[in-house]
Amino acid sequence: MRAGLDRDKTDPTKYRQEGNPLMNNTEKTMDKIVALCKNRGFIFAGSEIYGGLANTWDYGPLGARLKNNVKDAWRKRFIQERHNSFEVDADILMNPRVWEASGHVGSFSDPLLDCKECKMRFRADNLIDEFDPEAHADGMTKEEMFDYIKAHSVPCPNCGKHNFTDIREFNLMFQTYRGVTNDAKSVIYLRPENAQGEYVNYPNVLRSMRAKLPFSIGQIGKAFRNEITPGNFTFRTIEFEQMEFQTFCKPGDDLELYEYFKNYGRQFYEDLGLPAENLRFHDHEKLAHYAKAACDIEFLFPTLGWGEINGTHDRTDFDLTRHQEYSGQKMDYLDPYTNERYIPYIVESTYGLDRTVLALLCQAYDEELVDAEKNDVRVVLHLKPSIAPIKASILPLSKKLGDKAMELRDELAKFFMVDYDDTGSIGKRYRRADEIGTPYCVTVDFDTVGDPEKGIEPDNAVTIRDRDTMEQVRVPISELRAWLAEHIGG
């Protein structure tokens, strides 16, 4: 027996018809998800007509919309709904002294080694983790990683041989020049993270917004890292987008906030549609010298296994202290309650936007057996309606009904992202909508408009078909907008 449309709308990814459970992520393949993304307008290879550029990807019409919906959800949760949370949009290019203060110029590097046989270059920690996920290379020194690779005869993923160079450190920042001369004085960098834009604007936000601790600064923006990537689709790229959230607090309050934001982030992901069983915390075994605590939220990706999608860190007062030292500007805070002066501690929670989108696509992807005798399998994206790129597809049952259907489409488009499709059978149009995650199809039929010549009155209603249940209900056009708003949520 099928459940009706009044099922729990807050978590549609958990709903399935009886006998048709959602595929486990371990049953899915990244190849199928990549193919769907390319064929249906989510993600394309960057510069594809020129042969592409390794590890660059362009978001198509549906991918861009999905990405923006995730941004909107993050802004609502982290900026709009929270007290004392402020958003900034800092420049990608910053004074190079920023990166000296942050330590990126001197120590932002990856441990890389080359295969002497096939000349391919790899990150030593990735090489170890792919060989043995339980080895936890993030807790090893450079020397320990090299010894592990040697002792376990870790093979080259490309050629299978075991003949590597020593591990060397390569700086990850993209360097360019400002002005017409290429000398040391004109060097600037593409930012490798967004966080520094929030740190250097801490005094500006503090002053202009009359903020009091604890308060937070958030930012969504691009970052760039010139790193060796394994080519795992959009999981690791040289250009990526981050949703950064920095909370400035009194020393002593930091660990409580750190634990709070770990769980706050996990709940955010669950509310987006990632189930608890495919999420886990991974505490860092090896902490950066400035960090008091650090933890990742990982998602179980098809093919790739567990991968980081969020990082939460207790950064103490390191960042503001360094910027005070290098800039000569005061970064302390006068506590209005105690009259103490101190440099705030920072609890950082960073969300990888591209990885989050990839996780949502992987989780939503499903292949459902509709008719075993006919071997009829439908591909469907069970995206939560609030983040689905298209909320409803407007379908005239016949092209003769196109005028009425287009009129309805134009009215709904003032409030929702909707699609119009009049090509092919109604069944094929349903399947196209399922494949891109559209939660509702709205069909305009002959009952909608009636037939005055035959004396048939219009019922001024449409049929709504649910993506997950494939059940249908009849809704008056006068109530359609409210019905969609209620079921799409936000």
Image (spheres, rainbow, N blue to C red):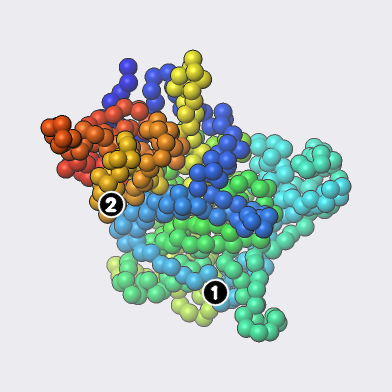
34 relative position to 395: left or right: right
Discs 1, 2 touching: Cβ within 8 Å: no
149 relative position to 187: left or right: right
Q: Which residue is mark 1?
A: 94
Kind of residue at badge 1: Met
- The part of the image, by quadrant, that contains residue 462 is top left
Q: Which residue is mark 2?
A: 410
Question: Which secondary structure, mark 2?
Answer: helix
Can you see residue 381? no
471 relative position to 307: left or right: left
Look at the image and tell me in which quarter the N terminus lies. Answer: top left
Q: Position of residue 206 (x, y in %)?
A: 36, 71
Which residue is found at the position 55% from the left and 73% from the top?
Answer: 93
Few, some or many C-alpha atoms within 10 Å of disc 1 (few <14, some 14-19, many ≥20)?
some
Question: Which secondary structure, mark 1?
Answer: loop
Q: CA distance from mark 1 to mark 2?
A: 44 Å
**Most extreme residue toward the bottom, as rendered?**
180
469 relative position to 286: left or right: left
Can you see residue 365? yes
Give above or below for 225 relative to 287.
below
Q: Which mark is residue 238?
A: none
Kind of residue at badge 2: Asp
Which residue is found at the position 65% from the left and 36% from the top?
Answer: 134
- Of labels 1 and 2, earlier in sequence is 1
Q: Position of residue 140 (x, y in %)?
A: 69, 47
